[in-house]
Amino acid sequence: MTEGIHLISNGKQSLEQFVSVAQVVSPYVNYIHIREKHRTDDELVKWIDELVKKGISKDQLVMNERVALAVQAGVKGVQLTDHSEDVSSVRTKHPNLLIGRSVHSIEEAQQAVRDGVDYVIFGHIFKTNSKPGLAPRGLKQLERLTESISTPVIAIGGITPERVESVMAHGASGVAVMSGLIDSEKPIEEAKHYLGGVRHGYSC
């Protein structure tokens, strides 16, 4: 199952800060992505170790781009981008690894599906501070993309708990969240709100 809520680190927090949030919201999210492009492999191993020490299963962890590290550490999956190793190459070498791909167009999504991806993350859907000056792709484009493939689509970008149901109504199988949980003063309450929106979306 790749649907649901994906918590993604934002590269701005310390290990201690991220672990403190990840630990309390882990019962309410499906996957926790370690997206720390500026950190070394040794640092990322420490991140994984600390998350596991706090009771988070490796089956809940996804490593951004670092395929060899993900395999070595025994985490569930890897999130690839257009700068990463090809999905088809990773799938061939690591058939049991959960593979996600970040995409920005229908064509990219369709190619990722042909290459054997398990899910795609598509965005940004709404205006977000992490993408200043870039126009959001919006719900209609999300809907067109979800209709073009059968693989689960995880929506990202400016998604608040209040927007989850509309995102799901336009074909998404789940949402990816960064600041909505990481920067929240009440992450548990926010996580419950996100989960409520996802569950309502499933039932509609």
Image (cartoon, rainbow, N blue to C red):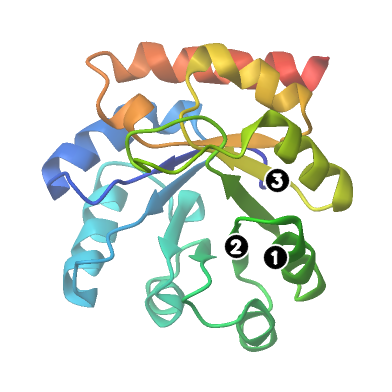
| Residue type beneath disc 2 | Arg
Write down the residue under mark 3. Answer: 153
Structural crowding at the residue carrying mark 3, measured as other residues with C-alpha within 10 Å and reported as few (<14), some (14–19) or many (≥20): many
Q: Position of residue 92 (x, y in %)?
A: 69, 87
Give percent across and percent down for residue 20.
Answer: 20, 34
Measured as percent of width and height from the top left, residue 188 is found at: 35, 17
Residue found at x 71% / y 38%: 142
Select label 1 or label 3 by which is in front: 1
Q: Is residue 204 above or below residue 123?
A: above
- Callout 1 amino acid: Glu
Q: Residue at x 64, y 87 (%)?
A: 89
Q: Residues within 10 Å of mark 1 (few under 14, many from 20)?
A: some
Distance in Å between CA atoms under marks 1 and 3: 12 Å
CB under 8 Å between discs 2 and 1: yes
**Tag in front: 2 or 1:** 1
Q: Which mark is residue 37?
A: none
The reply, left or right, for residue 147 in relation to residue 137 is right
Residue 189 quadrant:
top left
The residue wearing badge 2 is 101
Q: Name the quarter where the C terminus is drawn.
A: top right
- Residue 140 percent coordinates (x, y): 75, 32
Pointer 3 or 2: first along the chain: 2
* C-alpha span from label 3 to label 2: 10 Å
Instruction: Work out whether 170 lies above or below 114.
Output: above
- Rounded to the nearest angstrom, the CA distance separating label 2 from label 1 is 9 Å
**Which residue is rendered at x = 48% and y = 36% of the image?**
157
Q: Report the residue marked by disc 1.
A: 108
| Of pointers 1 and 3, the one earlier in the residue sequence | 1
Q: Secondary structure at mark 2?
A: strand
What is the secondary structure assignment of the residue under circle 1?
Answer: helix
